[in-house]
Amino acid sequence: MSKFNDYNFAGHKALIRVDFNVPIKDGKIGDDTRIRAAIPTIKKVLSDGGSVVLMSHWGRPLKDIEKKPNLTLADFSLKPVLSRLAELLGTDVQFADDCIGEDAVNKAKNLQAGQVLLLENLRYYKQEEKGDKDFAEKLSKLGDVYVNDAFGTAHRAHASTAVIAQFFSSDNRMFGLLMEGEVAAAEKVLHNNEKPFVAIIGGAKVSDKILIIENLLEKATDIIIGGGMAYTFFKAEGGHIGSSLCEDDRMDMALEIIKKAKEKGVCIHLPADSIIADKFANDADTSSCINTEIPAGWMGLDIGLMAIEQFTKVIRASKTILWNGPMGVFEMEKFQHGTKAIAEAVVEATAKGAYSLVGGGDSVAAVNKFGYADKVSYVSTGGGAMLEFFEGKELPGIAAIKDN
């Protein structure tokens, strides 16, 4: 049941927190995924006969200006989003040059049914990231219904994502369609999964993924570990990894994970072999090698054929799949085969009835790159937020709607 879908926005002004923190270079949007993801929520309000005030952050203006005095607030404006947003909505979008100033207040006040207003970058104010209550209250006066549709910032206790909800009655605060979908997908995988449940965890560092692995030891039947972080495990077990990436100070932690997994009956799958290179470059000389016997001066940059076969078998047999992190340096053509093969295995398992959730910036980039985003069950828009959810943490942006 969707509280948002059941709500009639006719005559209401919806203040929607979106996540338009998209890549922008020279005024051009590099990837509009997050903008497109918010469109169904906005259109629902407009089709009901309501109006929409959109608020978002972009970048870290105050921190970056402090480091680079040649930058100004104008370099962090949300204005470049306007034309693409208007194109996707099929209607004009007004713009306020502030988020709580006179221009924002007046334009929000005069907004008519069917109209959309985009506020300037919330992070022009330090009060946003500090979760300032007075700042949140000023924002709240720009609408009579609060909708949080920014899963990508749900892990931040900021004014517009967590503090603002208290200024709206329980009937007039809710998740948007994107947020509802994100929360439902994450809860299905973490709390209502069907076994076997395989978690595919990749990326560079064990330290970045330790909390999610430890929490998944309580939930998953299998955990596949790939990417640079795998070599810390191999070295910890006495293997030779050449010049592959390794966190020497995390080797005890890696051994502890293996020990805990055995105690809990969870199967940890480490890649049997790697595609190795003599340098970190697309034009490097390459070879394949067992992961405990990588020669000096060589580094593992992708999983090998044996690992692909090994991992594919586990994925094909699963009923629930969580994928966070690539298997190698997939941005380089020579080292993308492993990540692509895992994506294909996830797609195949999904087609056979498994539920698959892909999340985390690099994993999402990979399924988009290979054209598989529409062939998995759900692709999350929130990297850090999804990671913290699966670490077992309470997300302030979710708690603010659910608990108040």
Image (spheres, rainbow, N blue to C red):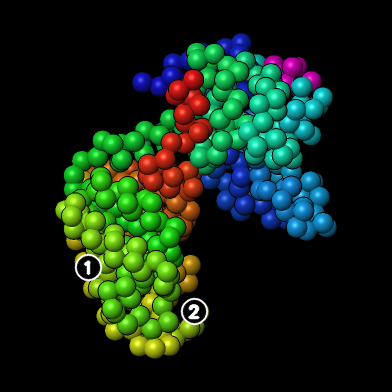
- In the rendering, at what x and y percent does residue 353 appear? 22, 43
Q: Which mark is residue 195?
A: none
The residue nearer to you, when weighing 373 against 120, is 120
- According to the image, label 1 marks what residue? 309
Quadrant in the rendering for residue 191? top left
Image vertical order of residue 154 relative to residue 287, above or below:
above
Q: Amino acid at mark 2?
A: Phe
What residue lies at 18% left-to-right and 44% top-to-bottom? 195
The residue nearer to you, when weighing 31 against 178, is 178
Q: Amino acid at mark 1?
A: Glu
Q: Is residue 108 magenta?
A: yes
Image vertical order of residue 220 relative to residue 130, above or below:
below
- In the rendering, at what x and y percent does residue 368 appear? 45, 54
Please identify, in this view, whether the residue under mark 1 or under mark 2 is nearer the observer: 2
Which secondary structure, mark 1? helix
Quarter of the N terminus within the rendering: top left
What residue lies at 53% left-to-right and 45% top-to-bottom? 33
Which secondary structure, mark 2? loop
- In the rendering, at what x and y percent does residue 114 appear? 64, 20
Query: Given the current orientation, which residue lies at the most extreme top position?
Result: 11
Residue 404 is at least partly visible in this image: yes
**Magenta stretch?**
106-112
Q: Is residue 359 magenta?
A: no
Image vertical order of residue 252 relative to residue 112, above or below:
below
What residue lies at 69% left-to-right and 56% top-to-bottom? 25
Say how many tags the image has. Answer: 2
- According to the image, label 2 marks what residue? 280
Residue 136 is at least partly visible in this image: no
